[in-house]
Amino acid sequence: MTLPRETAPDSTPLEPPRIPTQTDVAVVGVGAAGLFAATWAGRAQATAGRPPSVVGLDGARKLGAKIIVSGGGRCNVTHWRVDERDFAGSTSPAIRKVLGRFTVEQTIAFFTSSGVAFYREADTGKLFPESDSARSILDALLREAGAAGVALLHPAKVTLIERDGDRFRLDTTAGSLIARKVILCTGGKSLPKSGSDGSGFALATMLGHSITAPVVPALVPLVLPADHFIRALTGLALPCRFTLFSPKGKPLATSMGSTLCTHTGLSGPATLDISRYWLVSRDTDPGARLLLDWLPEIPEAHVEQMLLENGAKGAISVLRKHLTERLAQHLCAAAAAPPTGDLPREARRRLVAAVKGLELPVVGDRGFTIAEATAGGVPLAEVRLDTMESRICPGLHFAGEVLDVDGRIGGFNFQWAWASAFVAGSAAARG
């Protein structure tokens, strides 16, 4: 085995890597989960007194593109407090079991031992490297993989995996090899330019697995009609609450936090968090309604009371104490409520509804090219949670976003990657 090979600059053509004829563990996809799984597989082999025999395969010219762009280039490695309630997709008990195998404290210890110190963002609880550079995280992952004796081979995109007796044959764009164990860490479909283009789902189905439906973008901005007033408020950011209701009025999901009006609709943390629920609901609950509360800290009755008590001053004079005047004007127009002068009772009720529960006519989303995560994937019900090994295809393990688990914004998807990869890598090398 060789240490991770240095990637040539983009302007320099890369020669295909030399693929070994066989390996003990093949890790398919060398992003965050793949690097972590490979490292722990190498460490487990060393602990057992076996020579390193772990290969990481990836189709990218340069490794870690998704890591580098995460967190605005700062890489939000995890959150100070993580539990199963921060995730969607597969069942909460299953997610909790995997998260419990590798905690936030263990994540911090891993990177600290590799020379990376962290700080906690006070208002969000997100943990970032003190360098404020995602490069320090990628460098640490590459360094630890190298120290564990992992061979990282790229560009070598895996195009086929099939059983070969009690082993696996992997065909790549650079050649073929035989592996005793395979760990699939190919990601989902978000940010396809980084390599997570959904091809891992095809590899999983080749080996007998199912993929949940629907598979949709998660943590993605939402698009509103071209003539919607929110699109005229580009750049406006304020704390809001989203609530998704079923056709019968049952709350399905909620999110609260900073919300950004954009030239296409809505973005910001609260929008990104609710997006996957809205997009899934299009298939599972047709007719679901998404409502936006512009003043989440003020009860609806209080808003109506303010308008009632100050009606003579006009609605704008009341609302601009809490919202920008432009937004207040647009809300009055949307509610067909006079912005100045007397506010009739029905107009007041319509305005309160617009302020506390504006129904959003979402027409789409910005797609996988913008999305930070994927909702959907291989169900955890098809995986043994103590090893992340397939229940369908023995010897195949999974980690990261290829599984049907997606977290809210704030480092939760990285923590899922670290935890699932630790379990998969350690178990694959031992088995």
Image: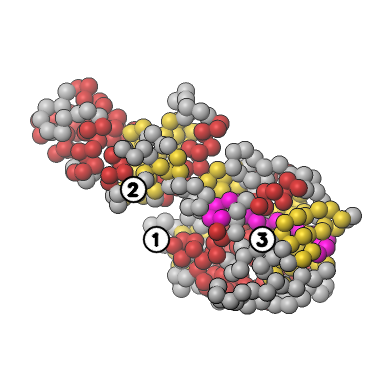
Q: Is residue 179 magenta?
A: yes
Q: Quadrant of the C terminus?
A: bottom right
Q: Is residue 135 visible?
A: yes
Give the left or right position of residue 180, taking residue 225 as reference: right
Query: Mark 2 is on which residue type?
Result: His
Q: Find numbered disc 3 in the image and state the secondary structure of the residue it sits on.
A: loop
Residue 397: percent from the left, percent from the top? 74, 54
Residue type at mark 3 is Gly
Q: Which residue is mark 1?
A: 122
Q: Which mark is residue 380?
A: none
- Give how far across and how far down residue 228 sits, in percent: 31, 38
Which residue is rendered at x = 84% and y = 53% of the image? 163
In this figure, which residue is indicated by the disc labeled 3? Answer: 29
Start and end of the magenta stretch? Answer: 177-192
Lower sequence index among marks 1 and 3: 3
**Residue 342: x percent and y percent?**
11, 27
Query: Do the CB atoms of the residues marked 1 and 3 lie less than 8 Å apart?
Result: no
Residue 382 location (% of width, % of height) = 73, 44
Q: Is residue 113 visible?
A: no
Judge by depth and name the residue closer to the eye, 64 or 250: 64
What element does badge 1 sit on? loop
Vertical position of residue 82 compared to residue 94: above or below: below
Comparing labels 3 and 2, the label whose residue is closer to the camera? 2
Where 4 falls versus 402 (above or below)? below
Question: What whole-number distance in Å separates the C-alpha atoms at marks 2 and 1?
Answer: 30 Å
126 or 217, nearer to the observer: 217
Q: Which residue is drawn at the image coordinates 37% and 35% (left, top)?
A: 360
Residue type at mark 1 is Ala
User: Which mark lies nearer to you, 2 or 1?
Assistant: 2
Protein image colouring:
secondary structure
Give the residue number, with chain letter if any, for mark 2: 263
* Mark 3 → mark 2, Cα distance in angstroms: 35 Å
